[in-house]
Image (cartoon, rainbow, N blue to C red):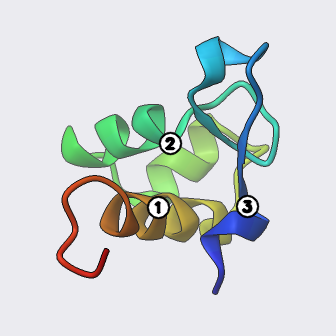
Amino acid sequence: MNYQDFITIEPDKRGGKPCVRGLRITVYDVLDYMASGMSEAEILVDFPDLTREDLHACLLYAAWSGDSPRQ
């Protein structure tokens, strides 16, 4: 999976933060939900516009950004 197929960055949307497929849901929102203990199933119920692939793309984005040793 290529997270770039799912994660978009638009300067005029959510302050230029990375969002899922142009929606107003940021990668950081999804990661916060996961970190708080929400399951994938719970997130998908609360945010029906998201898919399981979107959630995985957020994790990939987080793994490949920042201080990752792969960079």
Q: CA distance from mark 3 to mark 1?
A: 10 Å
Crowdedness near tag 2: few (<14), some (14–19) or many (≥20) residues, C-alpha within 10 Å: many
Q: Residue at x 32, y 68 (%)?
A: 63
Amino acid on which the number 3 mark rests in the picture: Phe
The answer to whether the residues at label 2 and label 1 have Cβ atoms under 8 Å apart is yes
- In the displayed structure image, the side of residue 3 where residue 9 appears, left or right: right
Amino acid on which the number 1 mark rests in the picture: Tyr
Residue 7, x across and y down, in percent = 68, 53
Element type at mark 1: helix
Q: CA distance from mark 2 to mark 1?
A: 8 Å
Crowdedness near tag 1: few (<14), some (14–19) or many (≥20) residues, C-alpha within 10 Å: some
Q: Which mark is residue 6?
A: 3
Element type at mark 2: helix
Marks 2, 1: nearer the viewer: 1
Residue 40's place in the image compared with 50, above or below, is below
Residue behind mark 2:
27
- In the displayed structure image, the side of residue 58 where residue 13 appears, left or right: right
Q: Quadrant of the C terminus?
A: bottom left
Amino acid on which the number 2 mark rests in the picture: Val
Say whether disc 3 or disc 1 marks the residue closer to the N-terminus.
Answer: 3
Q: Residue at x 77, y 68 (%)?
A: 5
Residue behind mark 1:
61
Q: Quadrant of the N terminus?
A: bottom right
The answer to whether the residues at label 3 and label 2 have Cβ atoms under 8 Å apart is no
The answer to whether the residues at label 3 and label 1 have Cβ atoms under 8 Å apart is no
Residue 48's place in the image compared with 71, above or below, is above
Residue 62, x across and y down, in percent = 36, 58
